[in-house]
Amino acid sequence: MNKITENLVRQKCKPCEGGVDPIPETQVKLMLNGLEGWNYMNDRINKTYEFKNHHQTLAFVNALAWISHREDHHPDISVGYNTCNVTYTTHAINGLSENDFICAAKVDHLFDL
């Protein structure tokens, strides 16, 4: 795990009800350097995870739901037989916040447990 990811995994999401600016694109690109396989487009970051079967996919979705509940920050997800696409954005600010990167790092960290 690199330093960026290590730092993000240790943080907790902060409530965001608007009134702050989204993270600037230059900072988004720096933070993405610490997240393997995540893509940035249209004020969102997303990643598609692949699994061996549907059971593993759904187990991942349940673990993702647990992270979302604990952090009170929820992604858009699309589930297929052996894939799960996860998309983060902070709707209250119409862009990306640090919460999006914290959760993305924690989701990736599931595979290190």
Image (cartoon, rainbow, N blue to C red):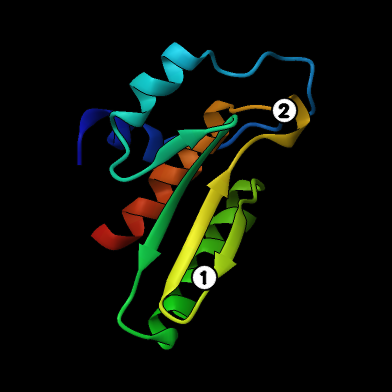
At x 38%, y 22%, the residue is 29
Q: Residue furthest left?
A: 1
Q: Point out residue 21 in the picture as x, y percentages from the top left corner.
A: 67, 13
Q: Pointer 1: what residue?
A: 61
Q: Nearer the viewer, residue 52 or 74?
A: 52
Q: Which mark is residue 69?
A: none
Disc 1 is placed on an element classified as helix
Picture quarter with the N terminus: top left
- State whether residue 82 is above or below residue 84: below
Say which amino acid is labelled 1.
Answer: Val
The mark that comes first in sequence, 1 or 2, is: 1
- Expressed as whole percent of the image width and height from the top left, the position of residue 20 reads 71, 14
x then y, percent, for residue 49: 38, 62
Tell me which corner region of the image, top left, top right, bottom left or bottom right, holds residue 78. bottom right
The residue to which callout 2 is attached is 94
Label 2: element kind: loop
Q: Is residue 110 rendered to the left or right of residue 59?
A: left
Q: In the rendered image of this protein, does residue 11 appear above or below residue 74?
A: above
Q: From what the image shows, is residue 113 above or below residue 20?
A: below
| In this rendering, the label closer to the viewer, 1 or 2 | 2
